[in-house]
Image: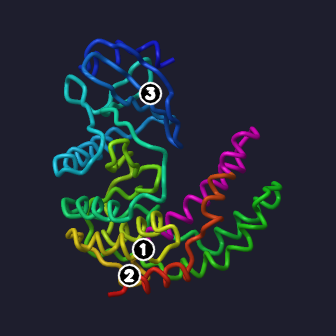
Amino acid sequence: MLGSHAAETAARFGLGEVTSFAGPVARGRVGEIWRLDTGRGSYAVKTWRERPDVAEVDADTALQEHFLGAGVPMPAPVRTTDGAVLAEVGGVPLRVHTWVDVLPEDRGLDPAAVGGLLALLHRSAPPASGPVDPWFTEPVGAAGWSELVAALGSAGAPFAARLGALVPSLLDAEALMDDRPRELVACHRDLWADNLRATPAGGLMALDWENAGAAEPAQELAQLVLEFGRGDPARWRALHAVYVGAGGPARLREPRDFTLLLAVQGQIVRVGCRRWLAATTDDDRADNEAWVAEFLDEPFTRDTVTAVLDAVDG
């Protein structure tokens, strides 16, 4: 158990004398978060279910330090006493950030505040080289959706028919995608409501930077307009207008600007379905069914893209 290694964890990262070590206080799709309190402050300790790539963690930590220096509100990464970003404690690889208190996820965050934060992030983003990870650019495609729906139907998935009925709309939306990159910069790429949170003090906090990397700013702008717009054209316009007014470099002008959003929608649904098929307990199946349902309940379609472009035009 990681909890028995509190003192070693604190020593490896130079955090001072431990007062408490509790967890997991949060679980995600790829790991867990523990809270470590010491005489110097509070820290979030993250573990992985699968061993991470050290080079990737080094790169995303350097990027986090860049954005932190530019004033983007986010937890600060903490390095070990010898300057590393990872430490293996009790046979478990882990990393540490300063602890921040955040409120529950909320897609109803003030769109002006969201637009202002994204503008700051994009204004300070360093150039990035491609290619962009296929997760953010590739459609599932007709064959992929057909295979998935057939497997779900054979396994008796309660949402198989619902997904099958939606496939024509998903394919129609995928036809809008264009993976030929223009100007790429380093973006967060995962600022859904679970990773962009309000704080008790009233600000916003950008969490979980492990998926950061090359993207077009307009692609990330589209993602946040849809995630925090909640289907309301007034909220779409407000977020976009404040982003532009705060010096954000992107504009939503054409359907290709929604490529990242549509690609990630398809990838998440596909992963959730595959995990449902591989699940061995009712709890795991229910968890993955709920994950897929988030997108089945409010899919991003060609009509959605057209409505957003009409709302923010001019």
Residue drawn at x 72%, y 39% is 283
Extent of the magenta region: 259-288
Q: Are marks 1 and 3 in contact (CB under 8 Å)?
A: no
Main secondary-structure element of the magenta-colored stretch:
helix
Residue to which mark 1 is pinned: 236
Residue type at tag 1: Trp
- The image quadrant where one finds the C terminus is bottom left
Q: CA distance from mark 3 to mark 2?
A: 41 Å
Question: Could you tell me the amino acid type at mark 3?
Answer: Trp
Asked if residue 273 lies in the magenta stretch, the reply is yes
Residue that label 2 marks: 312
Q: Quadrant of residue 54?
A: top left
- State which tag comes first along the sequence, 3 or 2: 3
Which amino acid type is shown beneath numbered disc 2? Answer: Val
Whole-percent x and y of residue 175? 53, 82
Q: Which residue is mark 3?
A: 34
* Position of residue 161 measured from the top left corner of the image (x, y, whole percent): 78, 67
- Whether residues under marks 3 and 2 lie with C-beta atoms below 8 angstroms apart, the answer is no
User: Which of labels 3 and 2 is toward the front?
Assistant: 2
Q: Residues within 10 Å of mark 3 (few under 14, many from 20)?
A: many
Q: Position of residue 101 (x, y in %)?
A: 38, 37
Badges 1 and 2: C-beta atoms under 8 Å apart?
Answer: yes
